[in-house]
Amino acid sequence: MSFTMIYYFVPEDNENGDEFNAFGINKAITEIKVSDIRKDFPLVGKYHFRFKNMINKAIVWMDLNSDDCAALMFQNKIIVKATRITWEKEGNGGQNNAQVRQVEVPPPQPTQASFNLFDFNPQSKPAPPKEHTFDLLFQDF
């Protein structure tokens, strides 16, 4: 039985791909599919996997559209950019196992003056007129 190391990094953890994390899969490198990587990926959460590949001497990160696709290789290694979608475990639809009960709560009443520009009270008094001040530019006294 063959053993293959899968090298990966997670950009959301401030990893840039200069150094890699790794985990192993008990299969030959040519037999590994995206589903194998998803199943054995060591971090909790839901991730989108992109595979480092070379096309016409250009290095690219390929998105594969199915978990049944064979994992792509770069220089005889599988290198994955694992973008975190959520911290929730995959397969639970982003819902916790606890029941969620939605309760309507009335909006809070303001307790002090609001500094919101859109708060308008037509009963408020207009500002008092300003005192006349000296204007150097227009010689207004």
Image: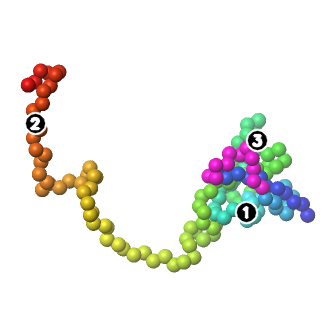
Q: Nearer the viewer, mark 3 or mark 2?
A: 2
- Given contact means CB atoms under 8 Å apart, are the residues at marks 3 and 1 in contact? no
User: What residue sits right under mark 3 in the picture?
Assistant: 54
Residue 13 belongs to the span the image colors magenta: yes
Q: Earlier in the sequence, mark 3 or mark 2?
A: 3
Question: Can you say whether 97 is above or below 32 in the image?
Answer: below
> Looking at numbered disc 2 in the image, what kind of residue is underneath it?
Glu
Q: Earlier in the sequence, mark 1 or mark 2?
A: 1
Question: Can you say whether 32 is above or below 51 in the image?
Answer: below
Q: Earlier in the sequence, mark 3 or mark 1?
A: 1
Q: How is the image coloured?
A: rainbow
Pinpoint residue 10: horizontal percent, then vertical percent.
67, 52
Residue at 9% across, 32% down? 132
User: What residue sits right under mark 1 in the picture?
Assistant: 42
Residue at 17% across, 55% down? 121
Dominant secondary structure of the magenta stretch?
loop
- Given contact means CB atoms under 8 Å apart, are the residues at marks 3 and 2 in contact? no
> Looking at numbered disc 1 in the image, what kind of residue is underneath it?
Pro
SS category of the residue bearing label 2: loop
> Looking at numbered disc 3 in the image, what kind of residue is underneath it?
Met
- The CA span between labels 1 and 2 is 72 Å
Q: Quadrant of the C terminus?
A: top left
- The answer to whether residue 77 is left or right of residue 16 is right
- Label for residue 50? none
Q: Quadrant of residue 39?
A: bottom right
SS category of the residue bearing label 1: loop
